[in-house]
Image (spheres, rainbow, N blue to C red):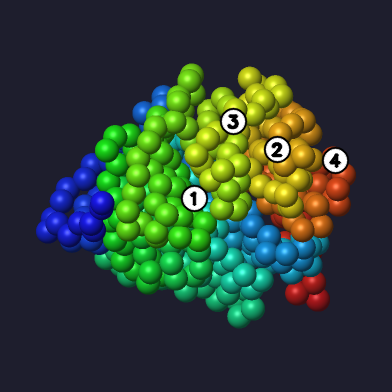
Amino acid sequence: MFSRRSATVTTWTSAGGFVVGSLICVAAAWSLGSRGMANTGVISHERIEGLSSVHFVDNKHGWIAGTKGVFWTENEGKSWKSQPIIVAKRFGHTVPWLRDRSGRILWATASRALVTTDDGLVVCDAASGSARRLNSGEIRVTRFEALQFVDFTTGWAVAGRNVYRTSDEGRSWHRMVEAPSDSYVSLAVTGNKVRALGNEGLWSCSTNNGANWTHTRLERRSSYFTRVQFFSETQGWILCTNEIRRTQDGGVTWDTIPLPQLEYSQPFAVDFSDSNRGWIVGVGSIWATLDGGFQWNVQRLNILDHMVDVAGLPDGSAWAVGRRGTVMKTFGKGPRWQTWSLELDLEKLLKKHRQ
């Protein structure tokens, strides 16, 4: 049984900051911990103005974010409005992995979105055209490996070998468990169930909102674990550097699912528009399924970008974004993907505003 820790001052190097009591205080730049994904041998990449995440609330209202900025649409993506927020302060230096930790959409409604920035968490209000920073200057969630919020107030995060929880918009973070081994790289929360994944297969689960935890180990073959996503209490996905796995029993058992031509790419994100139709995006590639993920087919190869996130819509269409700023959309239930010029849409809005 796990009881919450409350140490006085405990140093920790895996995420580059320190814990005071049960609060986490860290430095100002988003990055990976020294015992995070850097252990997998993945090289660093130059930080550029690009995109990190896409999220649609319904068919009309959606958000796109990244170091390039935060953008909002209320008309199915026909036009986008830039939000008054600076996501990234500095470019040119290197960041591990392919996804920047700033510019991640953690929670969203039709008009508001919670986004990570170099200065911590920010709520964008598209209706009023305003942005509000949630973190105080002393406490910043800047080196968490992964975060997931279940509303605008309550969220979870992993950093190094620790899992944290906040219930006050990210102002304070309480350590819920420390891993017996590995460093956590991802987590998934559905209801009261919390699942944390280590880069070498550590699988930590809680069924009572983090009060008690069990630790098991998933078999690791020739790849490292990078991300876990759950779309219901039972259906979940694990993405590895060169394979994907699917569970239908809440993570008790996992099946390796073939992904065509994976040797030429690497998966980064998965999403579904319903129980059958879904997409996976990766390095220069997009895959699709029509049977809940048992079989996948390649829809796009040789995209000149690392596609890092995808969002399925209720009408069967989907949006995808890339690290270098690529925006793509597939319309209706067709297999064709079209490159979407976000800059042109913003220019049209500016021209209309000047008239």
Whether label 2 touches label 1, CB < 8 Å = no
Relative image position of residue 350 (x, y in whole percent): 73, 68
The amino acid beneath tag 1 is Ala
Quickly name the residue at label 2. 293
Residue 128 in which image quadrant: bottom right
Regarding mark 1 in the picture, which secondary structure is present there?
Answer: strand
Circle nearer the viewer, 1 or 4: 1
Residue 108 in which image quadrant: bottom right
Q: CA distance from mark 3 to mark 4?
A: 29 Å
Q: Is residue 173 visible?
A: yes
Q: Nearer the viewer, residue 30 or 223?
A: 223
Whether label 3 touches label 2, CB < 8 Å = no
Q: Nearer the viewer, residue 199 or 93?
A: 199
Dot 1 or dot 4: first in sequence order is 1
Q: CA distance from mark 1 to mark 4?
A: 30 Å
Q: Nearer the viewer, residue 172 or 206?
A: 206
Q: Nearer the viewer, residue 1 or 331?
A: 1
The amino acid beneath tag 4 is Arg
Q: Give the numbered dot on residue 188.
A: 1
Regarding mark 2 in the picture, which secondary structure is present there?
Answer: loop
Q: Quadrant of the C terminus?
A: bottom right
Quickly name the residue at label 4. 336
Residue at position x 68%, y 60% from top? 56
Regarding mark 3 in the picture, which secondary structure is present there?
Answer: strand
Relative image position of residue 274 (x, y in whole percent): 74, 52
Relative image position of residue 220 (x, y in whole percent): 45, 24
Dot 3 or dot 2: first in sequence order is 3
Left or right: where 341 falls relative to 263 = right
